[in-house]
Image: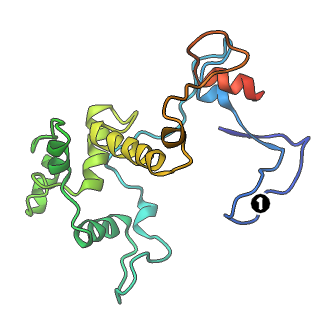
Amino acid sequence: MFGTDPANPGPDPDNLAGGKRALRRFVEWHRFFQIDGSPEPDNISKKIDSKISSALFQLPFSAIAGLSDNPSSLAQRNLLRHLTFSLPSGQALAKAMCIEPLTNDDLKDLKDLGVQMEQKTPLWFYILKEAELRTEGRTLGPVGGRIVAEVFIGLLEGDRLSFLRADPTWHPTLPVNAEEKFGIVSLLKFAGVA
């Protein structure tokens, strides 16, 4: 996904504060988009599902302050967050969004827990299971996808410098493209990276 060019050695930023990437690092865009006769893009990401990697049961530090015995399991942390912040169940959120919720049968693996999680599934698990069942793990499902979309839309609408607020009638154009519509590949070519 990310290639390296040994002909362009150079330092990478040494912290998470950002900065320009080293010239030797580049994104292999043909793995994501079909560009000028390249083969079908390689989707090398793992599928989204409700299985949790064993490494996520032994996280190195706790993100939950104030607990004397902080859990190292991501699943346990997510359950605590779900309860602490009184998040709605996946089914409740699906219904509020007018989306057909997963059925009890879809979530039958949770029935053995004996706490009716198949009827009121924690949102984080519901989103994973929804992607697994509704899209075969290729993308987020309707509830998960809408949450992500609404976050981005909310950020754009809330930013007074965003084109949605500053100039809602703005229409993107590409100087080298006479066509009215263009896609991401056109932008990548214009930027000189494809």
Q: As rendered, which of 71 and 121 lies closer to the eye?
A: 121
- Locate residue 190: give its quadrant: top right
Give the amino acid type for the residue marked by disc 1 in the picture: Pro
| Residue ID at (77%, 60%) | 13
Q: As rendered, which of 158 and 61 lies closer to the eye?
A: 158
Secondary structure of the residue carrying tag 1 is: loop
| Residue ID at (11%, 40%) | 103
Is 161 rendered above or below residue 70?
above
Q: Position of residue 77 (x, y in %)?
A: 34, 70
On the question of residue 84 being in view, the answer is yes
Q: As rendered, which of 126 and 192 lies closer to the eye?
A: 192
| Residue ID at (34%, 50%) | 51
Q: Is 115 situated left or right of 151 in this image? A: left
Determine which residue is flagged by label 1: 13
Q: As rendered, which of 44 and 146 lies closer to the eye?
A: 146
Is 82 rendered above or below residue 137?
below
| Residue ID at (46%, 62%) | 55
Q: Is 14 situated left or right of 57 in this image? A: right
In the rendered image, the quadrant that contains the C terminus is top right
Is 149 rendered above or below residue 81?
above
